Every structure is written in structure tokens, then in C-alpha cells.
Amino acid sequence: MILLRIVGYILLLSGIAALGAELLQYLEAGTWRSLPLGKLWYDLDRESLNGFQVVLERYIWDVLWDPVVLTVLQWPAWAVLGTPGLLILALARRRRPRRMFS
């Protein structure tokens, strides 16, 4: 459970950082532009993005890349990273033992 919470916090903080980057971009330019996950991944490490595409198309299933993964890569990075982080944290939260009698 602790490992799931750590992964959840990492995803949530990454989503918050991506949203912060969008806000800074808005303050500098004056217009809101979404930061797609694909652009963020490309800016961080383009070779791993290309490698992911090659592995997915060659070894797993080539149909997954074009309609599925490309669509997700066009979504805002804060939503793609933050939403699973929140879901993981909600599922892996610490549960207090129920008291049968007060």
C-alpha cells in the first residue's frame, strides 16, 4: 500500500507541476495554452517517446498507437498525470479500523 501511495503522490505532484507550467505560460503570454502530454514527454526525452512508439507498434499491437495513444498524448498533461494520481491515492488511503462498540 505504501508503494501505491508513493506512486499516487508522484503522479499528483507531476500533474500539479504541469498545471503550474501552464499557469506560468499564461502569465507570460496572456493567453491560455494547454500543455499536451505528448509535448511534455517530447521535451523531456524524445528518444523514449520514439522508443515507446516503436515497441508498441512492433511488439504489442500497432493499432493501439494511432487512435488510442495519440489521443491521450494530445490531452492536457495535468489531467493525464493528476487524475490517476488522485484515484490511486483514494484507493490506497489508510483506513481506520471500524469500532463495533463505542
Image (cartoon, rainbow, N blue to C red):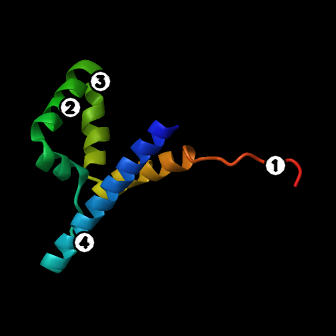
N-terminal of the pair, mark 2 or mark 3, is 2
**Image side of residue 83 versus residue 35, left or right:** right
User: Percent from the top left, x then y, of residue 93?
Assistant: 57, 48
> Residue flagged by tag 1: what amino acid is it?
Arg
**Image side of residue 49 versus residue 64, left or right:** left
> Residue flagged by tag 2: what amino acid is it?
Phe
> Residue flagged by tag 4: what amino acid is it?
Leu
Work out whether 31 lies above or below 39: below
Q: Residue at x 35, y 51 (%)?
A: 81
N-terminal of the pair, mark 2 or mark 1, is 2
> Residue flagged by tag 3: what amino acid is it?
Trp
Circle 3 is placed at which residue position?
A: 61
| Image-quadrant location for residue 21 | bottom left
In three-dimensional space, the C-alpha distance between marks 1 and 4, rounded to whole angstroms, equals 45 Å
In three-dimensional space, the C-alpha distance between marks 2 and 1, rounded to whole angstroms, equals 49 Å
Q: Where, quadrant-wise, is the C terminus in this rendering?
A: bottom right
Choose mark 2 or mark 3, whichever is in front: 2
N-terminal of the pair, mark 4 or mark 2, is 4
Query: Which residue is the extreme one toward the top?
Result: 59
Mark 4 touching mark 2, by CB under 8 A? no
In three-dimensional space, the C-alpha distance between marks 3 and 4, rounded to whole angstroms, equals 37 Å
Q: Which element carries disc 1, helix, strand or loop?
A: loop
Q: Residue at x 24, y 71 (%)?
A: 23
Circle 2 is placed at which residue position?
A: 52
